[in-house]
């Protein structure tokens, strides 16, 4: 609409129905309705309040947290299997390193070691509060809330933990039985962002979306040298014709905890003669296409066999022997291993 002021100047005016200004009770009630059909979270810890909540509508982050304002935050994950934390130390090691690279002050203790111990305690207690014995955990260290500045000056680092059921996993059981994937033309992250697990996952999301547009789901990225990089949130691994298990070096991609465990477990297959070697190396796209098996690894327990790649079958077009054995070894390690586990004290 237009109006004319006292000097005869035309001015534009916004005319609309006023938005409701909600009371605290009205806001919480409406928010409860909004989040009810969404992913179920068993519990959330926030260092801002120093405790755990289980009501979904209370699982919030301040709008001026720099995780939102500037994406200035890092995160990581771990698994809860049969009431035990799995590989939390490996994830915390990467998480604290990511925070230091992102110049986020560690939220606990005076050293990285002290911070990791405190974070592990908080993660364990949040899992116990959720009551879930098989779950996924995500934890975030943010530059903190306080303002909308470019830098977090004046903010205090924040630590958040969420515990969710396995049903909330980004990888379905169907996908773990074999998928169709596509090479996508999405830019790679610069090295700092690629090797640091930050909240900036825009390119990761676009990678998955580009594959989904063609009938895939996760996407395969190739670097500027024509070598395999990674998938959207998983590492790539291949079995060559001469039975070598190979995966790309971590120079310009995230050092995945799952693929590192896979390489460790796969040594047993070398001993058995199922594999001839396990190696990290540059993998040209043409060599990768000649491989007889391919799988994606992430999330501690996600091994996703790729049976069709760019509309061409990998090997026989079925889940291969090595991939199947890796799945068995990894599942056994998760459920029955001891070196990477912590027992949880449920009441």
Image: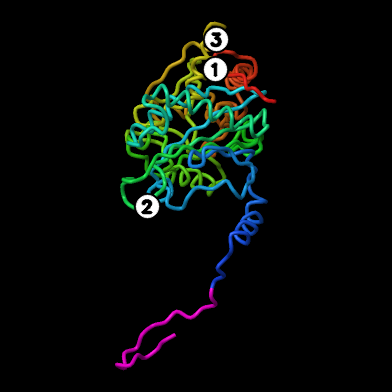
Residue 228 location, quadrant = top left
Question: Which x, y percent locates residue 194?
Answer: 37, 35
Label 1 to label 2: alpha-carbon separation:
39 Å
CB-based contact (under 8 Å), mark 2 and mark 3: no
Work out whether 57 lies above or below 307: below
* Residue 291 visible here: no
The disc label shown at residue 284, or none: none
Q: What range of the chain is rendered magenta?
A: 1-18
Q: Which residue is mark 1?
A: 340
Disc 2 versus disc 3: distance between alpha carbons?
A: 52 Å
Residue 55 lies, with reference to residue 102, above or below; the image says: below
Q: Main secondary structure of the magenta part?
A: loop
Instruction: Give whichever of discs 2 and 3 has the lower sequence position.
Output: 2
x and y percentages locating residue 301 in the rendered image: 58, 26
Tell me if residue 8 is in the magenta stretch.
Answer: yes
Residue 2 coordinates in the image, percent (x, y) = 41, 87
The label nearer to you, 2 versus 3, is 2
First in sequence, mark 3 or 1: give its number.
3
**Residue at image coords 40%, 36%:** 222
Q: Which mark is residue 268?
A: 3
The N terminus, quarter of image: bottom left
Q: Is residue 174 left or right of residue 295?
A: right
In this rendering, position of residue 265 left or right of residue 251: right
């Amino acid at each position: 609409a237009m109006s004319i002021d006292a000097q005869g100047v035309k001015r534009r005016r916004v005319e609309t129905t006023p938005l409701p200004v909600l009371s605290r009770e009205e806001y919480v009630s409406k928010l409860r309705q909004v989040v009810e059909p969404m992913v179920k979270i068993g519990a959330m810890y926030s260092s801002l309040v120093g405790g755990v909540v289980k009501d979904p509508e209370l699982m919030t982050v301040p709008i001026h947290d720099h995780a939102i304002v500037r994406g200035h935050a890092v995160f990581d994950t771990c698994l809860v299997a049969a009431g035990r934390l799995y590989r939390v130390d490996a994830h915390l090691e990467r998480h604290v390193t990511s925070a230091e690279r992102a110049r986020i002050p560690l939220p606990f203790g005076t050293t990285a070691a002290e911070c990791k111990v405190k974070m592990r305690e908080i993660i364990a207690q949040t899992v116990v509060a959720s009551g879930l014995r098989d779950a996924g955990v995500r934890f975030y260290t943010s530059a903190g809330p306080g303002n909308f500045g470019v830098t977090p000056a004046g903010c205090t680092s924040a630590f958040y933990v969420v515990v969710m059921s396995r049903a909330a996993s980004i990888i379905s059981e169907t996908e773990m039985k074999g998928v169709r994937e596509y090479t996508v033309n999405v830019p790679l992250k610069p090295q700092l962002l690629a090797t640091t697990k930050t909240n900036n996952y825009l390119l990761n999301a676009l990678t998955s979306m580009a594959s989904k547009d063609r009938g895939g789901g996760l996407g395969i990225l190739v670097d500027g040298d024509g070598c395999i990089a990674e998938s959207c949130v998983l590492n790539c691994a291949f079995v060559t014709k001469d039975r070598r298990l190979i995966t790309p070096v971590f120079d310009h991609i995230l050092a995945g905890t799952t693929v590192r465990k896979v390489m460790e477990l796969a040594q047993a297959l070398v001993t058995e003669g199922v594999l001839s070697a396990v190696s990290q190396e540059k993998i040209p796209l043409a060599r990768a296409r000649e491989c007889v098996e391919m799988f994606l690894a992430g999330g501690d327990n996600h091994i996703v066999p790729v049976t069709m790649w760019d509309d061409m079958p990998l090997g026989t077009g079925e889940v291969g022997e090595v991939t199947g054995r890796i799945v068995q070894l990894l599942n056994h390690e998760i459920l029955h291993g001891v070196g990477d586990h912590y027992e949880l004290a449920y009441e």
